[in-house]
Image (tube, grey):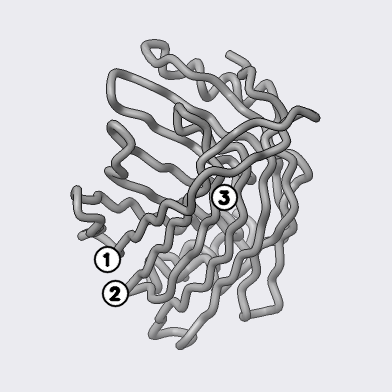
Amino acid sequence: MPVARVIAALLAVTLGLDAFVVYGATVDHPVGVVEAVRRFRAAPSATGGVYFYDTVGYERVDRLGIRRDYPRVSARIVRRDGCAVREEVVLLREHTETYTSCNGVRTGFGTRLTYFFVPSVTDLTCDAGGACRDERHDVTASLDVTDEGAGNAVVGGVTLPCRRVTVTTLLSGSNAGGARRELCVDADGLVLTERRSVGVVARSAFVGRVVYAEEATFTLRSTVPLR
């Protein structure tokens, strides 16, 4: 086994949730159309599809000067099953996010980040009041959703009406900080545009305070999904 992978595995055992920010990989793998559709088809009972977004942005950690730029196009896999909606945002194979809701109410969200083969995972469950918790990783969060009123978004050269929503997330526990997501969503809740800013401080007994930051924008390319 390569030395880098052995070191990463040992750090994962020692640091748990914080391991990804200690030994950072710079090898990134965008997810193409074929793989994104395959992921959607893995849940055959669901309806929905795969949507693609023009993407500009990056993520960065302050240890070792690690920065990853996002691909110009990213995928969002949307599955609908009754009232439940599950969105899987695929920025890279090393960075995926999930958002779940029922009848428009957020029921959970999570992130999986991988640096040098070491995954960092959070998976929070939310109540109707916007209080969220991941017991396993000692992370809590509060969600504040603000309706900013009617707006418009340009999708594939066509101007579409949307609802502007700002989602503010405050984290505490083993990770502290927050995120601000400015969304423009259609009547079915599909994200037409998103602008986000994330800043999180992770605590580690091994390296101390580590800062993760993310800035990105997303614009839907077409309202017709691939299935």
Specify the amino acid type for callout 2: Gly
Question: Tag 2: Cα neighbours inside 10 Å, few (<14), some, or many (≥20)?
Answer: some
Asked which quadrant contains residue 26, the reply is bottom right
Asked which quadrant contains residue 76, the reply is top right
Find out whether the residues at labels 3 and 2 contact each other: C-beta distance under 8 Å.
Answer: no
User: Where in the figure is residue 220, as x and y percent of width and height?
Assistant: 67, 35
Name the element at disc 3.
strand
The front one of 84 and 61 is 84
User: Where in the figure is residue 17, as x and y percent of width and height?
Assistant: 39, 66
Above or below, 206 relative to 154: below
Residue for badge 3: 95
Question: Tag 1: Cα neighbours inside 10 Å, few (<14), some, or many (≥20)?
Answer: many
Above or below, 179 relative to 184: below
Q: Residue at x 45, y 88 (%)?
A: 208
Specify the amino acid type for callout 1: Thr
User: Where in the figure is residue 3, as x and y percent of width and height?
Assistant: 63, 64
